[in-house]
Amino acid sequence: MDRVVKKRIVKRYQVTWLGFVLAFCLSLGFAQDLTLAAHYTAEQAAALEPCIAAYAQETGVNVAYQQISYGDYLQTILTARIGGQAPDIYHIYSIWAPQLVDNGVLDAPPDNTLSWIKDSYISNTVDAVTINGQVWGIPTEVSNYMLVYNKQLLAEAGFDAPPSTWTELLDMAAAITKRNDQGNITTAGYAYGSSTATVVHPFFTMLYSAGINPFKDDFSGTNLTSPEAIAVLEQQIELFKQGITDRSIEVWDFPSGSIAMMFMASWFEADLRAAFVDNFDDVVGVAPIPMGDDWRSLQYAFFYGVDANSPNKEAAWDFLEWLNTAQSEGQTSCMGTMLMDLGALTANKADIAAAQDNLGDSFTAPYVAALERSITEPNVIQASEIEGILKTYIERAWAGELTAEEALTQADKEITTILKEFY
Amino acid sequence: MTTESLQSSPSRRRRRLQQKDWAPYVFLAPMLFFLVVFFVLPIGFALYLTFTRWNPLSTPKWVGLRNYTYLLTSDPTFYLTLKNTFVFAFGTVLIGIPIALVIAFVFTLSRGKAFWRSIYWLPMVTNVVAIAFIWQIILDGTYGLLNQLLAFFGITGPQWLSDPKSAMIAVILVAIWTGLGQNMLLFSAGLEGIDESYYEAARIDGANTARIFWNITLPLLRPTLLFVSITSFIAGMGSFTLILVLTEGGPIQSTNVTALYMYQMAFQDLRMGRASAMAFILFIIIFIITLIQLRIFRRGGVEAY
Amino acid sequence: MKLKNRSKAAIVLSILKYTVLGVGAIIMILPFFDMFIGALRTPAERLARPPIYWPKTPQWSNYQRVFTELPMLRWYLNSIVVTCAITFIQLLTSSMAGFALAKYDFKGKKLLFNSVLAAQMFPFFLFLIPLFFLMRFWPLAGGNNLFGLGGTGFLGTYTALIFPFMISWYGIFLMRQFMVSIPTELMEAARIDGASEFRIYTHIVLPLIKPALATLGIFIFIYHWNEFIWTMTITRTANDLQTLPVGIFLLRGAFQTAQTESLQQAALAVSVVPLIILFLALQRFYIRGLATSGIKG
């Protein structure tokens, strides 16, 4: 499971009991034409409520909101479909899409919706919802990665600017790392995590920066054994060889001030602000991925899709387009408002323009600016299985069990076997 | 049975005999129903699935023995998880049972039983998800309670759950901690069942406590020992909830046991067919080992079970 | 002289005895203690490096927040309903089947007993997927027609959480072992008095095996109070039916930030303590059962 994503969603698991009752009564009390299933809690999705009411008044179409916990979203869709309880509208993490498409779960948007999507969203993000050239839905929440660093730790070690290359990063990180009497790292120059996302996403980010795609364009194989990919993993291994970080160090410890640098997505802002409060601007810095001038970032997206078996497909697409379009000049769309409330990013161009107050601060602005150079997480089938395999081999290389080349060669072999099954 | 009852009215007797004949089937009816509907039927379905490729979004596709050959010949992870499963199951039995036995023995000789029992049973009434979360925090390598205590005594503890070398040990220790109360309970019940006269005879012969334990308690406790070790072993081979919450099989697959691999294969990778095949292979292994265990114990003079 | 030696040895022995028990007891308690203390920390105390162990101003409100921010009471209710129902049903079915297997001679008895033994060896995972479909396509339930189509079966009902646990092979085996030792003469005597077989079961057998029932009941209760994989699978589409372990599990990852870790520990404590108190309070009722029954081969 992708802890990064999961964590963000679940960390706001502040479902009040009341919310539950309310949602339940809502779903029972009104005749409904559409069901929308998303992982946002009732509280997080509160901004949608007046919109749904307004839409009902305007068009007579009622929409019921159904919350499904993120960690089990895909399984819930499965069981719901088997159980004949599938919703009309799904809110989906982009890497799940190939599987859903492959099994005919999703409906292809009608032409007018399609051209609207292409016009209204940043094209890199539209890639996230594109499989085999077909766009499958409306992108919503996007996340990308930047180098987040602790200004104070860097300054203490005599550095006044973040690194711009990996060599600089290694030097600075090595100077910052401290250990206690037991030899455990107490201040780490750099951090990874232990979830699939916190291992694989930084690796992909560096691959993109090195000008390499993890997979061949037609998904017939991987590019993991390319010299560039091996070089990237070797760069990472240096962190462990030099004792700058180890597997006990997790990105989630950054708020304690014991971690100097990490690749992190924008949604972590809320946690950082809660931890550093007034010192936030003095401590937390955001910088480009330190891979030279041609650096790239990785982005992943959620999107709205419609169930292919839904009897109300047309109504569902109409509603979704309405939901993602500003209803008055200079305002954000309903979905945009909700995402802004959550502190999340959007790839909706109109929403970005209308929400400069929200997106313009020193932390968020670099992320938004980087969306243009953020390449989407590969929409490969069996993505979680494949990323899980890659994660294991990256970790083995970090631990020194395998060289970078051995690790990536073995990963390539296993992943190619899976790709051969499906492509 | 008295002669009188044999001679009682023939018709009444026949009716009673009849009831006695069909009564067991009535008592067994729920079990028989369950056996067919919730056991044979599902197993048949699962067996069918092992010959298919299936994610629950589509319909199963027949692939013959491919799932089995893949697992047994080319899956790089399967044998690793099998090894981990054995380490986990044997580890919990071989370390856990002697500890539980000693504690139970000392316990039966002590005063204030209700007090001690309450303490040792705490993990037993705690749900496994809570146990895993509690220990996750304690086992933190740098700031966790355990390593802080060890550091107090000048010992450098490992990064329990984030070092592949120590993660399995940590998981086994937590499993033993979790099961200690229940095993102790079973052993102390067995110990209390041993007739006092054996001990008296031994004491008159001048045997000390260790000797009594070794020569009298252990042999007399053999049926309980057999029961507990076999059930713990079977449970250990198939259990994965604790590991799922504690480590999710990591780091670097070091705690990934077959049952967990199976679960993740089915519900994360959506390979129901291959996962079912793995379940069957694991079952066959458990079955064979259990038979061997029984044989060994029988030879050791235990006719139970 | 000899006597003196002996008493010295006895003292050493009892010191040793209580040291072993005491150290073990500390190891048993410490994790719970850590949890209770942890629940009282502020985020700042967690974020300090090294973290502050003893909270300066204990945050008792964390325990309150568990009830206002999480559906804790609902989880409790579900756990209690499901566990009690399963315990009752399993005690009934186990004692009935155990009785038949222990005290009657009939065709297929050996085969059935062996299947009870063998069935225990099947890992539950094997049943997970098929049972789900069984619950979904159960005929004439939840709007289903005779062929199990059209509705949602038992999905979204308590039945789905209870039904697949109607029988415990382990329970049947245990009951059978206990009942083998009931003297057959008692039953014969009752038969002579004209008692029906059912009456023998309810009035002679059940009272005799009360202690064993208590023991088994505790095992079943504990096992199903903690059962998690099936409940998790079947309640994915039914948040209202989630039990304590499932509810708490779905918080995983949610509470890893300093802001919420204390809340997680408070939630754990709240999920654990009432059951502990219940068992301590009931101790004297079931200890007797354990002492008299034992686990016999």
Image: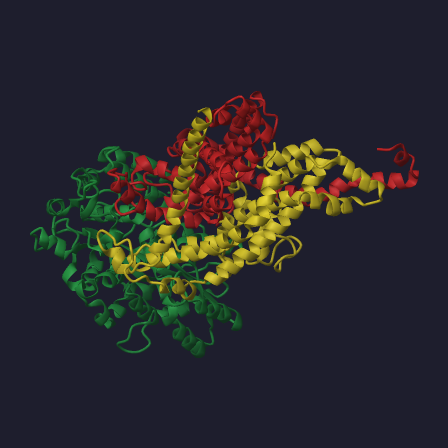
Chain colours: A green, B red, C yellow
The single residue placed furthest to the front in the displayed view is C1
A124 on left or right of B130:
left
**Looking at the image, can residue B44 be seen?**
yes
Give the residue at x 48% y 25%: B208
Q: Nearer the viewer, residue A272 or C282?
A: C282
Q: Position of residue A228 (x, y in %)?
A: 19, 40
| Image height of C6 relative to C249, above or below | above
Q: Position of residue C2 (x, y in %)?
A: 45, 24
- Quarter of the figure that contains the C terminus of chain A: top left
**Looking at the image, can residue A41 be seen?**
no
Q: Nearer the viewer, residue A407 or A218?
A: A407
| Image height of B267 relative to A327, above or below | above
Q: Position of residue C282 (x, y in %)?
A: 56, 52
Give the residue at x 70% y 37%: C101
| Image height of A408 relative to B134, above or below | above
Q: Position of residue A142 (x, y in %)?
A: 29, 60
Q: Nearer the viewer, residue B260 or B246?
A: B246
Give the residue at x 32% y 42%: B161
Q: How many marks?
A: 0
A238 on left or right of C62:
left
